[in-house]
């Protein structure tokens, strides 16, 4: 009887071991995001109606997204390719794993025989793709020296290793869906979408067994309107912002162990600072600032270092042609005054290329 119950006990033990490891971020709270610019080099990807190459669009958007992530305290971006180079699909996965990435975002542009089809789509790995990947993962003995889902596969027999991989990947797929939903929600605000919900497919770049991964088809290069947008740098900037906001939204909602979600921030008081202004800047109440810093009243002194409790994450937006404070206010759901106070802006005019903090 005890022998028959052992697999059940083992499964419960594995769940306890594996599921905590699904929370992203290193021990210091840094969230590492692997950004994968699809295609590259001799692999041009889709070709637009005017001859633009998908590989170039993917790289441009990826680089803009990397800048936003690297400008965010507690986050770091790694890129699977830099420049116009060909990188094998499995190598892209290896880069993410070697860098201990917490999230994987692959950026592409779609194409179809019908030029009327347009809009963005988001994909995560299908269960069928996951099952076949587990078999391939175990086929190479070198993989037994690796750590999957925080548990070493060293000295584990094939059955146990397969169980570890299957369970870890199942959890990673569920996390991928949550990440995909947040990114898709932001893309819906940006423009039309082709698929209204997160789809599942067997893309190779999504097959890491323990990294939540999504593939974003930003638009259709075969559609004249979509291609015209993708060629414009200001739209690429807006697109990268949408991807960034989706990632931040996912971290805030579902990953309470990350530095981003915990709001590990501090502020050194400068002349003119008040608690109410800092509250607007960091998206927290003045009373919470007082409580976090054991202040008896609202008096703060120049040079004093204040702890900033968890509030709304400070986002970043690079101003593109046509952007206005009122449009940004509506897009991000914050007041114009909050944006101006956070960035020290006195006038209503904003300059193209400026990176604004969005409270």
Image (tube, rainbow, N blue to C red):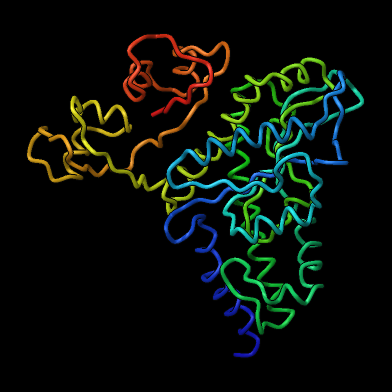
- Using the rendered view, name the quadrant where residue 274 is placed: top left
Q: Quadrant of the C terminus?
A: top left
Q: Using residue 75 as the reference point, say whether residue 187 is left or right of it.
A: right
List x then y, in percent, for residue 344. 33, 21
Q: From the viewer's perspective, is residue 23 above or below residue 261?
A: below
Q: Is residue 252 above or below residue 64?
A: below
In percent of width and height, residue 17 lies at 53, 71
Any part of residue 33 in sight: yes
Name the image quarter holding residue 184: top right
Q: How many marks?
A: 0
- Residue at image location 45% in from the left, 42% down from the top: 252
Residue name at image x 68 percent, y 78 percent: 160
Observer-nearest of 261 and 78 = 78
Tell whether 118 sits left or right of 177. Answer: right
Residue 165, x across and y down, in percent: 68, 68
Of 19 and 309, nearer the camera is 309
Is residue 176 visible to the viewer in this orientation of the structure? no
- Locate residue 334 relative to residue 170 in the image: left or right: left
Residue 125: x %, y % from top left: 73, 50
């Amino acid at each position: 009887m005890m022998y028959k119950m052992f697999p059940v006990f083992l499964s419960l033990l594995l769940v306890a071991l594996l599921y905590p490891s699904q929370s992203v971020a290193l021990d210091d709270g840094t969230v590492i995001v692997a950004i994968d610019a699809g295609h590259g080099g001799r692999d041009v990807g889709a070709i637009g109606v005017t001859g633009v190459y998908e590989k170039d669009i993917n790289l441009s958007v990826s680089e803009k997204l990397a800048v936003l992530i690297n400008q965010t305290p507690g986050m770091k971006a790694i890129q699977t390719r830099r420049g116009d180079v060909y990188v094998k699909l499995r190598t892209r996965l290896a880069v993410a794993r070697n860098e201990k990435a917490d999230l994987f975002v692959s950026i592409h542009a779609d194409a179809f025989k019908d030029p009327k089809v347009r809009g963005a789509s988001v994909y995560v790995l299908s269960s069928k793709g996951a099952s076949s990947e587990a078999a391939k993962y175990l086929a190479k003995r070198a993989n037994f020296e690796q750590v999957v889902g925080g548990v070493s596969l060293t000295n584990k027999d094939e059955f146990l290793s397969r169980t570890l991989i299957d369970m870890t990947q199942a959890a990673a797929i569920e996390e991928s869906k949550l990440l995909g939903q947040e990114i898709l929600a932001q893309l819906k605000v940006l423009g039309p979408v082709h698929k209204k919900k997160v789809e599942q497919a067997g893309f190779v770049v999504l097959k890491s067994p323990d990294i939540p991964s999504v593939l974003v088809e930003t638009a259709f290069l075969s559609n004249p309107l979509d291609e015209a947008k993708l060629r414009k740098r200001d739209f690429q900037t807006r697109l990268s912002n949408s991807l960034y906001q989706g990632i931040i939204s996912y971290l805030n909602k579902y990953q309470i162990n990350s530095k981003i979600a915990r709001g590990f921030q501090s502020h050194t008081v400068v002349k003119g600072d008040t608690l109410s202004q800092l509250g607007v800047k960091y998206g927290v109440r003045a009373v919470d600032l007082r409580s976090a810093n054991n202040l008896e009243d609202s008096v703060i002194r120049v040079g004093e270092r204040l702890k900033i409790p968890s509030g709304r994450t400070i986002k970043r937006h690079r101003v593109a042609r046509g952007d206005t404070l009122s449009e940004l206010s509506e897009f991000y759901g914050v007041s114009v005054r909050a944006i101006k106070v956070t960035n020290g802006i006195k006038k209503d005019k904003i300059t193209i290329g400026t990176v604004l903090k969005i409270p």
